[in-house]
């Protein structure tokens, strides 16, 4: 069974941006409002941050709960891990996710600046300075036969798409424009030369799901 | 976390039948053609019976691969287990599924006729003569905290719906009429007094998914 490289539950604006400009500690998505972008997932019963019972169990919930299905490692870009740029000035920053990150697997953070690995709960973060194919090989080995999730951001996903390493992508397109930021695509049609696609408008009305798989 | 009772990947014709008439060893679905009814699932990469690589990884695949997600036990009616009626005349019949049934959990077969439990691979079949609530309590205990799948057939699902024990249902409605057989509903609208629903036409064109969850 092939180990897939999968993009899952990645959100972009209708003009193709995965995050806005000016990311900061207070604004992980820059000028984009994550509550607005992720409203479709937050409304589901399986949303990992849900603290009270309830939530929908329709189409959006299938996509939300598939997040960790058969996933053995995650790859992310440095800007998904945190707002710092350049050399790590301190090692206090341990990511946005608190003491229990939602990954539960090894996570490979792509950065040009070395930093020791550390573990929070059952998630271990490794910091790697290599090309996409090499990082994918490391993540595949760490995943022990399971699939690898490519977590984002848009720039990192683009690098793996350009190297033609991505097997499946689920991108949720929100009906809002950002105008600037980090862009995944000009248009989802760009990928149709290499991917099959299902376009599924969510019955919740909050988003349209684009499900791609490699030809 | 509540242990859900879930119907998953259950197929009916556009006139509401889950199987045709005159079930036999040669025709598990009676006069219905299972290849036609299940074509949507058979085309997916995650279809358990797939023997060669390939298959789609779009919407239908999300539904197919969710089949065993967090499931700890299955309940089925006797007519899903096999074509015999009345007292068990022999114990040679071990189900339709060969030496490796796709359940991988305890399975509770509802029947008025006693028979000893047996195990095939990692699936154990138990034969129980009780009301739906009692069988569900047994299955919940066997599931050890995970959810319970209600596998069918239509008559068995109806019993649990009438007892208001079902939490979520995924029913795939095929664009074909059977005219007679075992019926799940006259119309899916019957359930809307007690359930929310997403209706999602599959982009494959082979089926329409109805995703219900209890209000």
Image (cartoon, coloured by chain):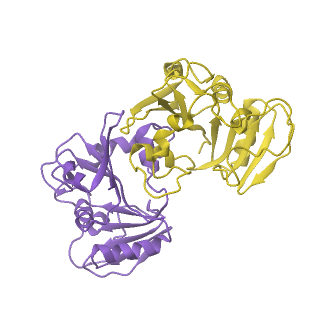
Chain colours: A yellow, B purple
Q: Residue furthest front?
A: A26
Q: Nearer the viewer, residue A21 or B29?
A: A21
Residue B193 x/y as whole percent: 22, 54
Task: Report if residue B91 is visible in the image.
Answer: no
Q: Residue at x 63, y 22 (%)?
A: A181
Horizontal arrangement in the rendering, residue B25 relative to residue B22 (left or right):
right
- Quadrant including the N terminus of chain A: top right
Task: Report if residue B31 is visible in the image.
Answer: yes
Horizontal arrangement in the rendering, residue A170 relative to residue B117 (left or right):
right
Q: From what the image shows, is residue A103 above or below residue A7?
A: below
Q: Residue at x 29, y 63 (%)?
A: B80
Q: From what the image shows, is residue A19 above or below residue B71?
A: above
Q: Nearer the viewer, residue B37 or A155?
A: A155
Q: Residue at x 24, y 79 (%)?
A: B112
Residue B47 x/y as whole percent: 44, 47
Q: Quadrant of residue A150?
A: top right
């Amino acid at each position: 069974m092939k180990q897939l490289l999968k993009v899952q539950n990645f959100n972009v604006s209708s003009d193709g941006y995965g995050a806005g400009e000016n990311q900061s500690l207070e604004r992980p998505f820059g000028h984009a409002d994550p509550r607005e972008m992720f409203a479709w997932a937050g409304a589901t019963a399986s949303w990992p941050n849900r603290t009270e019972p309830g939530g929908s169990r329709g189409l959006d919930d299938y996509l939300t709960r598939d997040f960790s299905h058969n996933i053995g490692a995650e790859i992310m870009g440095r800007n998904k891990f945190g707002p710092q740029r350049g050399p790590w000035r301190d090692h206090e920053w341990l990511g946005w996710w608190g003491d229990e990150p939602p990954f539960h697997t090894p996570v490979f953070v792509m950065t040009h600046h070395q930093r020791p690995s550390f573990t929070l709960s059952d998630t271990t973060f490794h910091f790697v300075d290599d090309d996409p194919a090499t990082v994918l090989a490391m993540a595949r080995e760490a995943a022990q036969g399971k699939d690898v999730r490519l977590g984002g951001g848009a720039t990192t996903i683009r690098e793996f798409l350009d190297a033609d390493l991505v097997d499946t992508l689920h991108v949720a397109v929100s009906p809002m424009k950002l105008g600037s930021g980090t862009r995944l695509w000009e248009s989802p049609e760009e990928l149709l030369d290499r991917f099959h696609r299902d376009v599924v408008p969510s019955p919740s009305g909050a988003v349209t799901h684009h499900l791609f798989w490699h030809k």
